[in-house]
Amino acid sequence: MERLKPENNAFTLAEVLITLGIIGVVASMTLPALINQTRAKELQTGLKKAYSVLQTAYNQMSYDEGQVVNGINYSNQRFMAVFKKYFKKYKDCGLDDCEPYGTSLRYHTYNNNPLDNFNFDDGQEMIVDGMFIFVENATQGEDLFISVDVNGLYKKPNRWGHDLFTFQIMPEGKLLPMGAKGTLYDGQNYCSLTSIHTINGIGCTYKAVTEKDYFKNLPK
C-alpha cells in the first residue's frame, strides 16, 4: 500500500516577505492617524484638567481674599504673588526666569510662526502635575491673563492653541477662555490658519473648549 506523503503547508520565503510588506504598508497608513488621535485626546484632556485646576484655584482665592479678583484690584504684578499659593509648586520661576521675555525660542504660534511672549512675563510657575502657568498682569489697566502649557514647558508641541492656552480674568470676576464673548482677543483673528501675528493662537481657547473636533483639526 502506498503511503500518503504529508503535505507541506509552510509559507515560502516569498509569501512571508509579501505578507510582511502588506502589514508594513497598512501600518504606515494607519499608524500616523492613530498617533494623531492619541495626541489630540491627550491635549483635549490636558486642557479640561487645566481649566478645572485654574478655576478651582481662582475661586478659592476669590473666597479667601473677600473681594473681586481682577486686574484692577490686583494690578502691577500683584496677582501671581497670591495666586501661586493655591498650587503645589515644582518650581517658582519668578516673573520670567523659565521663559524669558522677548521672541520665544521655545514656543510658536497656532500655525507655527515665531511667538512674542510679552503676555508671559508677570509670573511663571511650574506645578507638580506637569503644567506650566504664565501670568500677564498689567502695571496699569484691567488686563489680567493666565496662560497654561497643559503638558509642561519641556514637552512639545509648545504652540498656542495646541498645548498652550490663555484665559482672561474679567473685571466682574469671571475666568473666561480667551476668545469667548467679551474677552480681549477673538478667535477669528487670533486663532487663524493664515495669520502671521506673533500672538496668533491666544484666541483659540474658547474654540478648544467648545468645539468637539477642535483638536482633530490642528494645523501641522
Image (cartoon, helix red, strand yellow):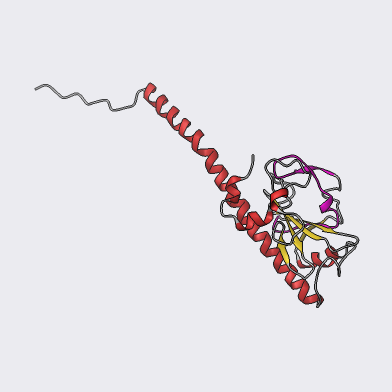
Quadrant location, the C terminus:
top right
Query: What residue appears at the point 84 percent right and 58 percent down from the top-left corner?
Result: 123
Q: Quadrant of the N terminus?
A: top left
Residue located 57% across and 47% down the image: 216
Q: Nearer the viewer, residue 40 or 8?
A: 40
Image coordinates for residue 34, horizontal then vertical, percent: 53, 43
Say which of 192 and 40 sits in front.
192
Q: Is residue 72 left or right of residue 212?
A: right
Q: Relative to 124, does residue 195 appear above or below in the rendering?
A: above
Quadrant in the picture for residue 45 = bottom right
Q: Is 187 placed above or below 1 here?
A: below
Compared to residue 78, the image places residue 23 above or below, namely above
* Residue 175 sits inside the magenta stretch: no
Q: Is residue 107 magenta?
A: yes
Horizontally, residue 39 falls left or right of residue 151, namely: left
Give x and y (percent) for residue 88. 75, 63
Which residues make up the magenta segment?
Answer: 103-130
